[in-house]
Image (cartoon, rainbow, N blue to C red):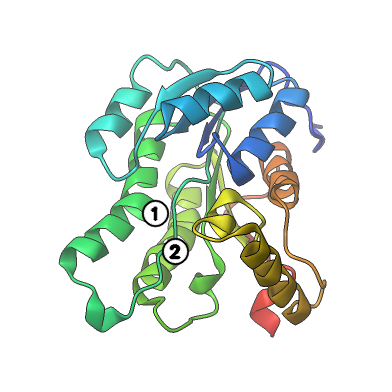
Amino acid sequence: MQQADETLAGSHVVVVGGSSGMGLALAARAARAGARLTLMARDPEKLARAAREVGGAAVRTCDLRQEATVVAACEGLGGVDHLVVTAGEYRAAAFAETGPQDWRTMLEERLIGPMLLVKRLAPATSVVLVSGTVSRKILPGSTWGTIALSGVEAAVRALAIELAPVRVNGIVPGAVDTPLLARGRTETAREDLKAAIAARLPVRRVGVPEDIAQTGMFLMTNPFITGETILVDGGAVLV
């Protein structure tokens, strides 16, 4: 009987959002487990650096907000065993201050683009989709983020049935120390923010990309889990 482990030898793993943060950490871990990697992201320079960092990987430029780039990134890719989508930003904005183009952008990046990737690549073994805690804990300014990320989690359950026996699972990360957390902040402001978040969390620290990578590896390599979404948030939704 097949056992769950962290061996991906001979598997082709595609990581969307693999140029930094959680995606890069997971790609590095998959590489150490013997996977052949393809990294996708918007920035070709960051992709090239990431490929070197993980010891060699194929790269494809892909912007989830632009269907043409998603289609082009999938062309000629060959068989895919595992697809992991960590890409996508969260932008807080009051509902009254947003309009249809803002809504479309959020849905394209967090839901439609990933669904197009799943359809085009049709992985043989598993899909892992990453959402965020505003799907569970609604905050001011989170309406469209909540809608989009809740849709991701609904897609996990629906696709687990539609694509069976391909396994489809999700991860809900909390505050993770990535470039996104630091964006637009000085180093001092970043450390102050991390300290404030850590003080509120039961685990008393913010997450690191490796926390998410560990969960992604579990979902890729455990052959008896599908349709599940795992919270990796340090207890954020509890407080």
Where residue 237 sits in the image (x, y, percent)? Answer: 64, 78
Q: Amino acid at mark 1?
A: Arg
Pointer 1 with pointer 2, Cβ within 8 A: yes
Give left or right: position of 188 versus 76: right
Quarter where residue 54 is shown: top right
Instruction: State the SS at label 1.
Output: helix
Q: Is residue 151 visible?
A: yes
Q: Which residue is mark 1?
A: 110
Where residue 200 sits in the image (x, y, percent)? Answer: 73, 81
Q: Residue at x 56, y 69 (%)?
A: 133
Q: Is residue 174 visible?
A: no
Where residue 38 sits in the image (x, y, percent)? Answer: 53, 23
Q: Amino acid at mark 2?
A: Leu
C-alpha span from label 1 to label 2 = 7 Å
Q: Which residue is mark 2?
A: 149
Q: Residue at x 29, y 45 (%)?
A: 65
Give left or right: position of 170 versus 109: right
Instruction: State the SS at label 2.
Output: helix
Give left or right: position of 32 versus 69: right
Of 219 and 33, which appears nearest the observer? 33
Q: Residue at x 36, y 25 (%)?
A: 73
Q: Earlier in the sequence, mark 1 or mark 2?
A: 1
Query: Callout 2 environment at 10 Å: few (<14), some (14 to 19), or many (20+)?
Result: many
Give left or right: position of 95 versus 183: left
Q: Where, quadrant-wise, is the C terminus in this rendering?
A: bottom right
Q: Is residue 207 above or below residue 11?
A: below
Of 211 and 183, which appears nearest the observer? 183
Q: Residue at x 48, y 21 (%)?
A: 59
